[in-house]
């Protein structure tokens, strides 16, 4: 990736820190394909692809929330690591629940992505902690309805589509998204 790619990311991240929701949406859209690419690497995972993408998007949100723009790390490197960690954590959780041995989960070669981007041990640790913290908050701090709304919103469903799928009205969906935003705005890493 070029330096202009990273500088665009840094500009968006700074705008996000100033509560610019358009910048957040732009960065999420920009990285949606990367989330999809990373999620598609997991063959025979005990989760469906949509669930893997949802977990990857949670990792992306954790990366956006916790990325330190003052460090000399590219956001794509950090985000990729957070996305991957979030997906792996979800697979581990589900595997424990289903008693599926971890060895049976086959990931497509990570070398293509990881060869270009290397994180320091400190950034690797921070990425794992950020994903873990956000995952805990989402699973413990949100109701099951809010989690479903978030999952559908992350995969690109409109308020109307979410309402239809969950058998609720759009106002309920909007209220749930506002509660989710409020809960997540208080999260610090």
Image (cartoon, rainbow, N blue to C red):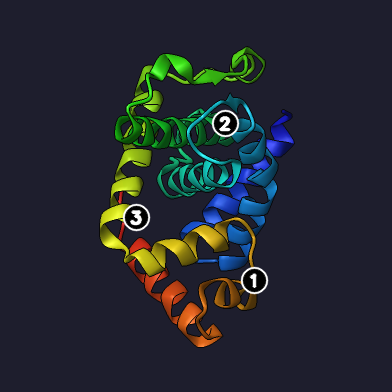
State the separation of the CA atoms marked 1 and 3. 20 Å
Q: Is residue 86 left or right of residue 21?
A: left
Task: Using the image as rendered, state which of residue 52 and residue 132 is in the foreground.
Answer: 52
> Residue at image x 43%, y 31%?
85
Residue 172 place in picture, x, y as percent: 46, 83
Q: Earlier in the sequence, mark 2 or mark 1?
A: 2
Picture quadrant of residue 147: bottom left
Earlier residue among tags 1 and 3: 3
Spatial separation of the CA atoms under disc 3 and disc 2? 26 Å
- Tell me the SS state at disc 1: loop
Q: Tell us which disc is closer to us: 3 or 2.
A: 3
Residue 145 sits above or below residue 65 on the image? below
Q: Secondary structure at mark 3?
A: helix
Q: Is residue 86 above or below residue 8?
A: above
The answer to whether mark 1 and mark 3 are in CB contact below 8 A is no
Quadrant of the image for the N terminus?
Answer: top right
Q: Is residue 18 visible?
A: no
Q: Which mark is residue 158?
A: 1
**Percent coordinates x, y for residue 104 in the rendering:** 46, 17
Disc number placed over residue 74 in the picture, else none: 2
Q: Label 3 belongs to which residue?
A: 138
Q: Nearer the viewer, residue 143 or 103?
A: 103
Residue density around tag 3, few if under 14, some if 14–19, many if 20 or more, within 10 Å: some
Q: Residue at x 57, y 44 (%)?
A: 53
Give the percent coordinates (x, y) of residue 75: 56, 36
């Amino acid at each position: 990736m070029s330096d202009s790619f990273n500088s665009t990311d840094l500009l968006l991240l700074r705008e996000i820190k100033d509560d610019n929701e358009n910048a957040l949406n732009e960065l999420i859209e920009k990285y949606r394909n990367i989330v999809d690419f990373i999620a598609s690497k997991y063959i025979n995972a005990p989760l469906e692809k949509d669930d893997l993408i949802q977990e990857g998007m949670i990792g992306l949100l954790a990366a956006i929330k916790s990325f330190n723009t003052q460090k000399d790390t590219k956001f794509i490197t950090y985000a990729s690591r957070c996305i991957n960690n979030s997906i792996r954590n979800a697979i581990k959780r589900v595997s424990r629940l289903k008693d599926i041995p971890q060895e049976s989960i086959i990931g497509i070669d990570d070398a293509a992505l990881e060869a270009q981007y290397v994180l320091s041990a400190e950034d690797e640790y921070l990425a794992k902690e950020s994903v873990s913290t956000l995952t805990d908050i989402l699973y413990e701090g949100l109701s099951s309805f809010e989690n479903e709304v978030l999952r559908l919103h992350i995969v690109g469903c409109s308020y109307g589509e979410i309402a239809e799928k969950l058998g609720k009205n759009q106002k309920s969906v909007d209220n749930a998204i506002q509660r989710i935003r409020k809960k997540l705005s208080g999260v610090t890493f």
